[in-house]
Image (spheres, rainbow, N blue to C red):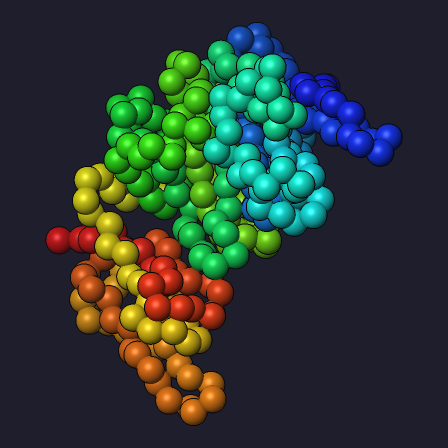
Amino acid sequence: MIKTIFETDLPVDEQFSIKKNTITNGSGKKRICIVTGTHGDELEGQFICFQLQKEILEEIDMLDGTVEVYPALNPMGIDSITRGIPNFDLDMNRIFPGNPEGTVAEQTAAAIVADLSGADLVIDIHSSNIFLREVPQARINVMTAETLVPYARHMNVNFIWVHDAATVLEATLAHSLNSRGTPTIVVELGVGMRINHYYGKNMVLGIKNLMKEMGMWKGQVDSSRIVEPIVSQGDSVSFVNAPASGIFSTETHNESIVEEGDSLGQIIDPLSGAVIEDVKAPCRGYLFTIRAYPVCYEGSLLARIHRLV
């Protein structure tokens, strides 16, 4: 059942609306919510929403609960391939929990939080931006790790990044919901403006595996395809930044183990044909982020590595 959770008029006889689709079967007691499209240039979640609903509806008798899918929290951003909310110059994931008496953007955020509150679990799906390629990972604030890491272990993600609290997180959807007692996991995968079908199908498998663990899915799940994630806690992530400006040329793939001193790629100068820098891994570890957009400036993020002993 498709329902509009927020709607308002736009200036020239048009409507702005946020919609969700609800699939219920069996007792309907447990409720899991899949949200995405907060950033308009992150499209991996669109395929995941489609594929998850397709597979559930094909075996609807196996569902014992309620699945709610919110594919576009920022529909105007998706329409225009814009990260933020067009015309408002806002990052939507920096205005939660919103204000029902505030601006249109704040009213939208407040309606989303109100509608999601009380769910047994919310999965907030993001892609990376256009610059970086990410392995499927769950990002969890250290303050909620005890509650959320056990869920994330069943989600078929390669990596769980438990990070320290930061002020900016207080305005995100995940922080707003977690602080209200609605457990919410942030998932990030792929690269901006693209869809990786392999990652997407693996994420759908992970969501169904988690639903099975929660007692919401009675169907078969291929457990042989569920990966055991690496869990990163504390100060165990090394950031590799560009030592110079140029074109970052790499054949290194994320999901790989690199050794200290391995070449991650080269910063090259197309004008002179010179190699400006050979970028080396600062440690042995698991490469879970690699730059996808070749143009870089001094200080640009090139890679992230989870250090291994």
The image quadrant of residue 46 is top right
Compare residues 88 and 227 and report the one nearer the observer.
88
Residue sitting at the far bottom: 272
Q: Tell whether 104 sits left or right of 97.
A: right
Picture coordinates of residue 169 (x, y %)? 38, 32
Q: Examine the rendering and report whether any part of residue 80 can be seen.
A: yes
For the N terminus, which image quadrant?
top right
Considering only vertical position in the picture, is 29 above or below 121? above
Residue at horizontal 47 percent and vertical 70 percent from the top: 295
Q: Tell whether 159 sits left or right of 27.
A: left
Residue at horizontal 34 percent and vertical 26 percent from the top: 148
Considering only vertical position in the picture, is 208 above or below 285? above
Count the marks: how many? 0
Q: Examine the rendering and report whether any part of residue 250 can be seen.
A: no
Considering only vertical position in the picture, is 226 above or below 9? below
Residue at horizontal 45 percent and vertical 56 percent from the top: 133
Considering only vertical position in the picture, is 145 above or below 195? above
Picture coordinates of residue 80 (x, y %)? 69, 47
Picture coordinates of residue 178 (x, y %)? 39, 20
Residue sitting at the far left: 309
Residue at horizontal 19 percent and vertical 61 percent from the top: 284
Picture coordinates of residue 100 (x, y %)? 59, 15
